Image (cartoon, rainbow, N blue to C red):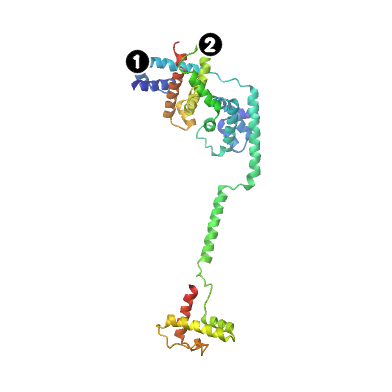
Amino acid sequence: MRCQKIEKWLSDRIDGELSKEKERLLEDHLEKCASCRSYAASIAKLQDEAMSIKDAEISPLFWEEFASELKANLKSFQQEKKVRRPFVLGWNWVWSGAALLVVVVGLYLLFFQSQPPQEMYVFSLESSLSRIYQEIGDDSELEELFNSVIMDSIGESLEDSGWRERPDFLENLLIWEDLSEGEMKFLESEIKKDVKT
Amino acid sequence: MKGSMEDCSDGRLVAQAKKGDADAFAELVRRCQEKIYFTILALTKNQQDASDLVQEAFMQAFKSLRSFRQRSSFYTWVYRIAVNLTLNFLKRRKREDVQEVLDESQSTGNGTVDSSLSPEGRSLKKELSERMQTAIYSLPLSYRASFTLVVFQGMTHSQAARILGCSENTVSWRMHKARKILQARLKPYLQGG
């Protein structure tokens, strides 16, 4: 364990990174430990040999070619940048665009979404019945069928709701004219419910 | 013009290069190209790869000059770009020859000096130098990078740490481990005077 620490210190010493305090402790240890002395000699030689490895000779021509290649690359990059420039948006433009979008959406919501929703379809009992009468015309069979359907429907759903008396559709096609204002409103609201569903 | 460039400080050249002055940038490159090239060459062991990577590193530096805040020197900054590019390149590369070099060094350099590997007239020192290069090349990448910067480029642990983007302590440990591995592999050559 101790020797492992010493080996690390030996490495640091070669790199000139060992403190004086550790250097002193290291020397004390080396005096007593043959194994560490051997390791110290070994890595010192390793360092010498590594330092003696010389960089390969590079001809000046290599650097000339290197420089001209770099210049050509720089030039082409700068030209490319010039061509691209009109289409490149800086961050300022991106933020401005985003802010403008927020304002436009805000205004849209303020003016269009704050108005109460308008009914797409306004039901009117009176106009609906007039239309039905037009459709029925002189077709007595259709008239009879219509009246019976309406009669049954009203009879089933409104029998217990305070209806004055059961109207006779067969005798009076314009039965709605005889209805009181309250009955008309009630009937209209019931039909509206059906229309919604 | 060229003479005036040579007299300029790095800081001034960086300022000019930031404005798009390619000549100023070329002068900055000229000042550090050799050191960076040899570091990359030591890491890749291939001249063409080293040349391409250094070229790429300088181009990347030029493109990102605006983001260079000059907290470190231009040399350290571009060195870091080059080393990072190279480490990424080597990680990506799965070349057969890398494995072959490893296999060869492990099978033939297993701690014994085989006389058949030392032809007559070939000095032990020359052989050690060759084996040393092979052994260094077969080190794990992070150890090799630290070893190259500290031993071959003479950097302090602190300088190497800045370039490698790690702590000084990490560099210190990597140097220790690298030496342990190399010492074990080259033991027969390192024994004796």
**Outermost residue toward the front?**
A141
The correct choice, above or below, for B185 with respect to A104 in the image is above
Q: Quadrant of the image for the N terminus of chain A?
A: top left
Which percent across, then down, holds residue A147?
Answer: 51, 84
- Left or right of A33 on screen, residue A186: right
Residue bearing the label numbered 1: A33
- Above or below, B63 against A163 in this view is above
Task: Give the side of residue A29 with respect to residue A124, left or right.
Answer: left
Is residue B164 at least partly visible in the picture?
yes
Tell me which chain the residue with mark 2 is part of: B
Q: Secondary structure at mark 2?
A: loop
User: Mark 1 Cα within 10 Å, few/some/many (few <14, many 20+)?
Assistant: few
Residue A81 circle label: none
Q: Secondary structure at mark 1?
A: loop
| Kind of residue sitting beneath label 1 | Cys
Left-right relation of A41 to A113: left
Q: Please state which of residues B119 and A170 is positioned toward the viewer in this rendering.
A: A170
Which of A34 and B166 lies nearest the eye of the viewer? Answer: A34
Give the foreground label among 1 and 2: 2
The disc placed on residue B123 is 2
Whole-percent x and y of residue B17? 60, 35
Q: How many marks?
A: 2
The amino acid beneath tag 2 is Ser
Q: Position of residue A8 (x, y in %)?
A: 39, 23
Chain letter behind tag 1? A
Residue furthest top as drawn: B121
A153 relative to A30, above or below: below
